[in-house]
Image (tube, coloured by chain):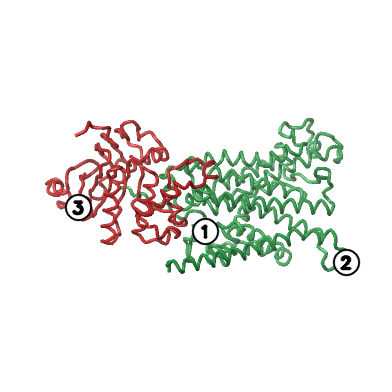
Amino acid sequence: MTKPQNPVLYLDDVTVSFDGFRALNGLSFVVEPGELRTIIGPNGAGKTTMMDVITGKTRPDKGTAFFKGTYDLTKLSEETIANLGIGRKFQRPTVFDNHTVFENLELALKADRRAARTLFARLAPAQKERIEAVMDQIGLSERARDLAGLLSHGQRQWLEIGMLLMQDPELLLVDEPVAGMTDHETEQTAVLLKGIAGKRSVVVVEHDMEFVRALATKVTVLHEGSVLSEGTVDHVQNDPKVIEVYLGR
Amino acid sequence: MSGPLSRSLAAGMESKARLYIRAALLIVIALLAALPLLNLFVPPSSPFYLPDFAVKLIGKWLCFAILALAIDLVWGYVGILSLGHGAFFALGGYAMGMYLMRTIGDRGVYKNPMLPDFMVFLNWKELPWYWYGFDNFLFALLMVVLVPGLLAFVFGWLAFRSRITGVYLSIITQAMTFALMLAFFRNDMGFGGNNGMTDFKDILGFPLNTDATRAGLYWASLIMLALTFLLCRMVVRSKLGRVLTAVRDAESRVRFLGYSVTNYKLFAFTLSAMIAGVAGALYTPQVGIINPSEFSPASSIEAVIWVAVGGRGSLVGAIVGAFAVNGAKSWLTSYAPEYWLFILGGMFIAVTLFMPRGIVGLFGPKGRGPRISKPSVANISAMLGTIPPEPKEQRP
């Protein structure tokens, strides 16, 4: 084992309440560099709120959230956090329907985000190659010039993952990537995400247990805003606490 | 349907259609440019003679078309429905009006070399400080863009930073222009109260009531319209333009990509206000008067209808709409003036329900306009800028 580095993501005792309802209740967890982590949990367990906290959309009432040990995520704006290297995929695929696949990736490309610069921005050959490489990776090279609005549901999900990759993030947050996908698409998505992890850290929120099994990673089970169990798929599936939460209701 | 063959076929048809549109545009521009010649060089007895009022009228429409471009830039491309763009137009108009007043000098009714007539009438002894400099044409031109630009910048900064969008933003823009209207109605504001400014004599030494000056202002408006069109086209075709339409279609996605949505909106809004100011500045000398009614919310709404009718999200559409609606207005108000407002309202509803992409949506290649297909209530809210909805963030 090498010397432990700073974790990519470090959440400690994070609490968020909406009108008295505790969406997150003293949530603590850590993601290591290059790790692929799956988060599962019943509805209302706080998965989306956790992502909101990490991306600066929601401010916690209590607790700390650090990116790479130095950046305090509870203080930074959404844009800053995105530019630091945290990419987020929404639950519902959100791509720009009136832009082509290529343009969607171009907009996501890591580049100067200031308005004065984008007005005169021209794609460098290297940037173009990078867009093409990502289109290849997400299997959409054929559709480069089609409007994203014409893509199938699964393709839109991949396009959005591709957009995250264009940002060259160190941490990807992926919310229910295979919801509504066919079995074949689900398999391909698992391959895609496993290919991304290693170089980058990936946190996947998912309901589909088949898919979670296919990813074969460490699983964190959330329940009522805190961590209920953590370990391999088999471990958490046999954890009596997990069984109670999932089956005992 | 998306095979490579049909795609290249579609692309070919698209480029052909684009060529036709470009040719048609050039012909229209040439015809528009030639129009004043029919006034200047054709004797009034000839059937081809264009009366003075027509030059003035079409010159006015050219200014309206510039205003329509300004509105389309923010509404059609960024999804900001401003119902207060008339205010920026009017401010530009007032800045030009102040120059025209100062340049009258001692030829006014009261022969006062410094004070415009309405100030003498109100017993003012000194020129208010904010009237200084307006005797200089270049200074006035600067104010024509700076004042609307500054107002839009401050207003936009406050609104966009607080993430006010959709109908709420529309309502406060409306309130802004209404407040300005009330302010400009007041005599002690020093802008001529409800009479506004009129009885202008000349511009840069050219008397305003001659055919040649009229034609000159007409041509200036046409050139400005062309330049504005090219500027807007450059903006919407740049990467910045693609960010702007992305903001329109999925604002929070853009934010999570790391763009400052506030700054982008602010850029578009401020630029748009400056363009509207220029339109107003060209308008004032042609109609010969500027008064607070230009600030009325109704005029701002009317301008939005031009864009809706012509085709939101298409620059050509905005211009077509300004001409079509104002043409219809001039024609109808002389035949059935009492019905005009009903027709205007009906036009808006009809376009919203059945032609969401406006007149230009009926022709030409499919653009990247906001895609709204079926007639439905959703279209109306789309027109109001509330669609596409932000993906509903789900709370657990």
Left or right: B57, with A224 as reference point: right
Instruction: Select label 2 or label 3 by which is in front.
Output: 3
- Number of labelled discs? 3
Using the rendered image, report if marks 1 and 2 lie on a common chain: yes
User: Circle 1 is placed at which residue position?
Assistant: B369
What label sits on residue B45 in the rendered view?
A: 2
Instruction: Select label 3 or label 1 by which is in front.
Output: 3
Q: Amino acid at mark 2?
A: Ser
State the separation of the CA atoms marked 2 and 3: 90 Å
Are the two marked residues, 1 and 2, in contact with CB atoms closer than 8 angstroms?
no
Q: Name which residue lies at 59% across and 61% down.
A: B309
State the separation of the CA atoms marked 3 and 1: 43 Å
Q: Residue A162's spot in the image, x, y percent?
A: 37, 51
Tell me the element at label 3. Answer: helix
Q: Looking at this view, is A83 or B52 the one in front?
A: A83
Labels 1 and 2: the sequence-earlier one: 2
Tell me the element at label 1. Answer: loop
Q: Amino acid at mark 3?
A: Arg
Q: Is residue B350 visible?
A: no
Q: Residue A176's spot in the image, x, y percent?
A: 29, 52
Q: Residue A108's spot in the image, x, y percent?
A: 42, 47
Q: Chain letter of disc 1? A: B
What label sits on residue B1 in the rendered view?
A: none
Using the rendered image, report if marks 2 and 3 lie on a common chain: no
User: Circle 3 is placed at which residue position?
Assistant: A213
Look at chain B in the picture and name its colour. Answer: green
Instruction: Select label 1 or label 2 by which is in front.
Output: 1
